[in-house]
Image (cartoon, rainbow, N blue to C red):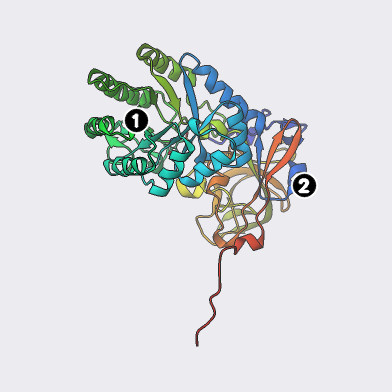
Amino acid sequence: MGEGILTGDPAGIAPGFPRVEGALHCRTLALEGLAERFGTPLYVYDAQGIEARVRHFRETFSGVEFLLAYSVKANGNLAVLNRIGAAGAGADIVSGGELHRALAAGIPGDRIVFAGVGKTEFEMEAALRAGVHAFHVESDGELARLEAVATRLGTPAPVAIRVNPDVESPTPHEYTRTGHAASKFGVPVSEAKELYRQADAASHLRVRGIGAHIGSQIVDVDPYTDALAVLLAMADELAADGVELEYLDLGGGFGVGYDGEPGLPLEELAAAVVPELSRRDLRLVLEPGRSVVGHAGVLLTRVHYVKRSGGKTFVITDGGMTELLRPSHYGGWHRIEPVQSPPGEGREVVPVDVVGPVCETGDFLARGRPLPLPRPGELLAVGTAGAYGFAMASNYNSRLRPAEVLVEDGRALLVRRRETLDELVRGEEIPPRTD
Ligand SMILES: *Cc1c(COP(=O)(O)O)cnc(C)c1O
């Protein structure tokens, strides 16, 4: 990793973010101009890139009836969700809050699948009223609670069991692995059949499908074909018992190339999946998050100071773990480039730690990264930050969460303004002292 930043990839920092006459752009708009207009730290998203990814998924899997249920947790900005929905996609949600977002963004309820191990009654009720595509049930306790809620409302609940296929999914970090037996997600294959039997017999549950989600940032097709085999075997067994499924959901987790390398080959996946599903007359659901929005976002951050200490060079920026948590949380690696001038041109390249202002040693965007030595005041772009960027931003250290801008048809649209100090303390109260 890391060659791109030294050579100053003329293609830019990611697709949709080219370098034009030395300056990084989002499509036709200079990033420096956006930073001056909206301030930093700033997230910038490329609408065209997002819509192109949705279209690409839909074309690649056009051999079967297909629902792209975009994983809202990757980037839940309403404008982003709205454009994804307008491109024909639905949503994969993991909370009542995400349901609220998806509906507010105009995504129809019947294109929403509801996953997650800890659904509350309140969330189930809201999802039932919204007419979701299905609940992806992760335990027997959840199935019983869902049946009770559906019975109380008199509204049958569409159900799929999220099976844990117990496959090895070689993700870059253990925190992003979910498809092995010892994870909290999904129902073991040995127990899934019994849950289907219960659901099939219940008056207020409707069996619809089967699903799995094996992890995140996976670049090989093999773990998916392993999971597919497990799900198909279960679907075939159920069919033999008279329980007909309508769809199969292979989850998300398709990896992207953070340093310009290819991500998961979707065509190869389609070649393995499509014939098996069409033969059985099963619809396909996929739940990509990162691979829809990852490349379509950058984080812009300005250099405050450059400081040498203990033999190291620290580049202190106005963005850090509160804006982009991935590097400190699970060792996520992002391209970082100066926005102006071809990187490296006439400048000394030195290994630097790019760190934020937060009072934590774990607050960094990159460590030991060879960069043309940045200057105070200079603007840096952090690439492939469209997924799990703003979505994981926090107010730690009472920092204001950054603004988000959507670039569309040559215009920069502010789709979330920077937080204010009033918003920072909203909902807090100082009770009167009783002495
Ligand atoms: C997080 C998640 C996804 C999306 O993962 P990506 O790596 O962003 O594609 C899909 N489905 C479920 C159930 C998830 O929890």
Give the x, y percent position of residue 335: 59, 39
Examine the image and state in which quarter residue 293 appears: top right
Q: What residue is shown at x 37% (from left), y 34% (from top)?
A: 156
Q: Residue at x 53, y 76 (%)?
A: 431
Asked which secondary structure carries label 1, the reply is: strand
Please tell me which residue lies in front, 362 or 150.
150
Report the amino acid beneath label 1: Arg
Instruction: Give the SS element for disc 2.
Output: helix
Dot 2 amino acid type: Arg
Ligand 1 shows up in the quarter that is top left
Residue 20 visible in image: yes
Disc 1 marks which residue?
206
Q: Which one is earlier in the sequence, the residue at label 2 or at label 1?
A: 2
| Residue 261 at x, y percent in the picture | 53, 28
Q: Position of residue 12 (x, y in %)?
A: 67, 31
Residue at image mark 2:
37
Packing grade of label 1 (10 A; few <14, some 14-19, many >=20) is: some
Crowding at label 2, few (<14), some or many (≥20) Cα neighbours within 10 Å?
A: few
